[in-house]
Image: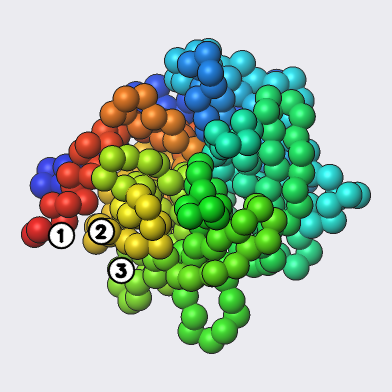
Amino acid sequence: MGKNSFFKELFHRYQGNPILTAADWTYPANTVFNPGATLLPDGSTLLLVRVEDRRGISHLTVAKSKDGVTNWEIDRGPTFSPDPENYPEEIWGVEDPRITWIEELNKYAVVYTAYSTSGPLVSLALTEDFRHFERQGAIMPPEDKDAALFPRRFQGRWALIHRPISNYPMTKANIWISFSPDLKHWGDHSVLLEARRGAWWDANKIGLSPPPIETEEGWLIIYHGVKNTPAGCLYRLGLALLDLEDPRRVVVRGDEWVFGPDEPYEQMGDVGDVVFPCGVITKGDELFIYYGAADTCIGLAKASIRELIEWLKDSVRS
Ligand code: BMA
């Protein structure tokens, strides 16, 4: 389809996309998508991939690569499986992990969706090595998902971005922020970003994509907006910037989406027209954004932090 060249491309797809599919897997898998990501101390990239089996239940599996692009080493079996006997909220699987390295704890925090019989909710596990996990259990009741931790405290408190949904008539699914003294007890909940209404690309339902990215200008937020069309849902990405010291303060939010499903592997699959990143790693100014494509495989897009922030600033000027 002809692209309008007035829009500056901010996210650049890797030409070899998709980088990982179920065909690469070391054991039976229906789909592999929505990976969390982190840079390991040796400079290699670790993805914690959501793997859906043929029952429909998801677990998480590690894939590692030296350059973050090729030669992925995939665990021989599930790395992190649902544990419904001890954590009944995981009965229908564990999904969509977001990884944050927490310097103060010397551990990675993995915030993931546990799919309970009352709906999806937010769970937390800590790990040093992605081999042993210390489950902390559910930290937000259902329905709530698309959550990630900030890497440090703000005035003594940890902060979590998440997306609760209520059944209240005409309500929208907004992005919220909450605080905790101990990663266990959460409060001071407030709306951080509201879904827009009507024809907007991010009308009615939005959610955080990868964890917040710390930059000199503030916390860069990549979020998804879900447009409900007669043909189904369209998942696209937008940008916002939060104040570095008070992340409840939105410095700027872009009006237009910046990345959407354009390629066949993003438009066709188990759930077509979806780009859904849960992981990002930073190498200097460069972002490597790992996204689920059509709930079926994994794509990589690169972007420049400087360009994204310039675009955000320009969007308020114009
Ligand atoms: C969202 C999440 C994601 C999924 C997306 C598109 O609500 O459940 O896991 O990729 O829908 O199906």
Residue drawn at (20%, 38%) of the image: 307
Left or right for 268, reference 83: left
Residue 78 locus on image (x, y percent): 75, 30
Is mark 2 in CB contact (under 8 Å) with mark 1?
yes
Left or right for 238, reference 174: left
Residue drawn at (76%, 44%) of the image: 135
Q: Which of label 3 and label 1 is nearer to you?
A: 1
Report whether the residue tagged 2 is closer than 8 Å to ligand 1.
no
Q: Pointer 2: residues within 10 angstroms few (<14), some, or many (20+)?
A: some
Instruction: Give the position of the C terminus as an image quadrant.
Output: bottom left
Q: Pointer 3: residues within 10 angstroms few (<14), some, or many (20+)?
A: some
Q: CA distance from mark 3 to mark 2?
A: 17 Å
Above or below, comparing residue 235 to residue 78 in the picture:
below
For badge 2, the amino acid type reads Val
Q: Which mark is residue 316?
A: 1
For badge 3, the amino acid type reads Trp
For badge 1, the amino acid type reads Val
Q: Which residue is mark 2?
A: 252
Q: Indicate the quadrant where residue 131 lies.
A: top right
Above or below, comparing residue 34 to residue 157 in the picture:
above
